[in-house]
Image (spheres, coloured by chain):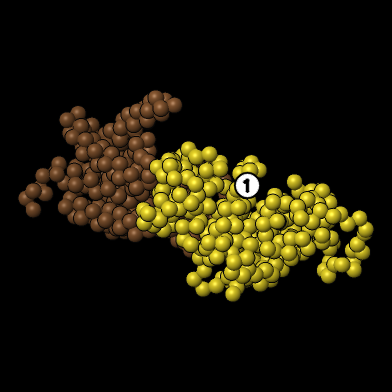
Amino acid sequence: MTLLDDFMLRAALAGLGVALAAAPLGCFVVWRRMAYFGDATAHAAILGVALALAFSTSVFIGALAVSLVMAMTVSALSGRGFAMDTLLGVLAHSALAFGLVAVSFLSGVRIDLMAYLFGDILAVSVGDIAVIWGGAALVVGLLLWRWQALLTATLSPDLAYAGGINPRREQLVLTLALALVVAVAIKVVGVLLIAAMLIVPAAAARPLAGTPERMATIATVIAAISALGGLGASFRLDTPTGPTIVCLAALIFAATSLGGSMLTRQRG
Amino acid sequence: MRLIETRDLSMRLGGDMVLEGVNLSIERGEIVTIVGPNGSGKSTLLRAIIGALAPSGGAVIRAPGLRIGYVPQKLHIDPTLPLTVTRFLGLPRRHPAEDLRAALEQAGLPDLRDHQMADLSGGQFQRVLLARALMEKPDLLILDEATQGLDQPGSAAFYRRIEEVRQSLGCAVLMVSHELHVVMSASDRVICLNGHICCEGRPEVVAQAEEYRAIFGRGTQGALALYRHEHNHDHDHSADCTHDHDHDHPHEAAE
């Protein structure tokens, strides 16, 4: 395992693992207009981190548990006709605030809050990589297994019901996948930017894709380029890695949207 | 053989009783049309039949292994979701390429395979929705206001296509429509719905029924091109009705 002693290589593997899981799931987040849903789930993870440290269990388990509770709560509320936009705004930000307050109570442990807010990809261990790739494989496996049903339910719940698919079960699959992605991405990009890893590559892929599958594939490629490129850029420019990754994804988004709109103007 | 049956079905939506005591069944191969004013519970009944809404009372019984082809009233495709016509036909289950080609051929849209759904005209979109519903070779085809937004020749062509489909697949068709005259003449059986089943039967019978006329008025005597004669005598309401009619029917034509 001498190869994995190189911290840059470990960081690259961690970034690729997150990109692989976040990008295809991010397509569903975009198609179903769940951007705020992703935010609320990700922000809740900081509370999970605080609880995990307080009870000295694994941060991954703590973040996964609290994210899952938050994602299930939001998912259950979304079917009941509340003003979702407001409710998600309240949940997303209060989860973050409660998490930050909870962390401040942990006087005994000296923790680097910034590492959980913005990620600390250069500090990932071999064990972290195993967790990230395990989680990513689970998410990609779930999405591949349910792909047709997820797509039908996303298009129209009524079409899904008529085809013998229960859209609420598919929603649950996405909810579970979302909590998993949040839990594995926390170390790489931090809770504040996880939603960006979901949404930005998917949005950047949209103008280049004609089918849902192509969009998910292109989004994954864009996310991988952003992860590796951002890692390299942050090393050279001595900038924080998580935000640099998101910046690169955002630049790609700007380029494809601009290119896409010029293409349609030419055709029209 | 009964494909689907509702037994004493009641539906309550947000505290309002939308449907009460609905008993209906559909046999293989028949075309059944539900007519009724706005808010009469037509779409709710269809959604209960496809399983999208759970009954508040009673039951919906489907034949085992029943395949339903559903054509919704409208379908909003989010602009962030890229979807070609071919890909759309492959939902919820994928089909071999030659089946897809044949389906588009039959729908009269052979050149639109790689077009985005968002770029189709209203009529093309409707034909693709129908083609998708037929991909599974359904036992029961359900159409909810499927001709909304089509012009008259367009919807006439659409109903001719439904008749062909029934012939070739032998499936039953259940549809809801506002276009009384067109849709009723194409049906084997008409169900007049207004929170409950007001009357049902062959189109020409329903068109003459007091309950039907109470809802749609006499302005729709063209409901059947074949039966144009006007009854100008008065029915004794209580003698003809076998059930209570104490609710308020809007007394204008729905058209």
Residue at 33% from the left image edge and 56% from the top image edge: A144
Helix, strand or loop at label 1? It is helix
Residue at 84% from the left image edge and 51% from the top image edge: B218
Of A171 and B42, nearer the camera is B42
Q: Where is residue B219 in the image (x, y as percent from the top left)?
A: 82, 48
Q: Is residue B79 in view? A: yes
| Viewport quadrant of the N terminus of chain B | bottom right
Residue B167 higher or lower than A249, as above or below: below
In the rendered structure, the residue with mark 1 lies on which chain?
B
Residue B134 higher or lower than A248, as above or below: below
Which chain shows up in yellow? Answer: B
Q: Please tell me the colour of chain A.
A: brown
B179 horizontally vs B232: left or right: left
Occupied quadrant, residue A192: top left
Of B129 and B37, nearer the camera is B129
Which residue reaches farthest front? B226
Residue at 19% from the left image edge and 28% from the top image edge: A237
Q: Name the residue under label 1.
A: B155
Occupied quadrant, residue B189: bottom right
Residue A219 higher or lower than B18, as above or below: above
Q: Position of residue A46 (x, y in %)?
A: 36, 48
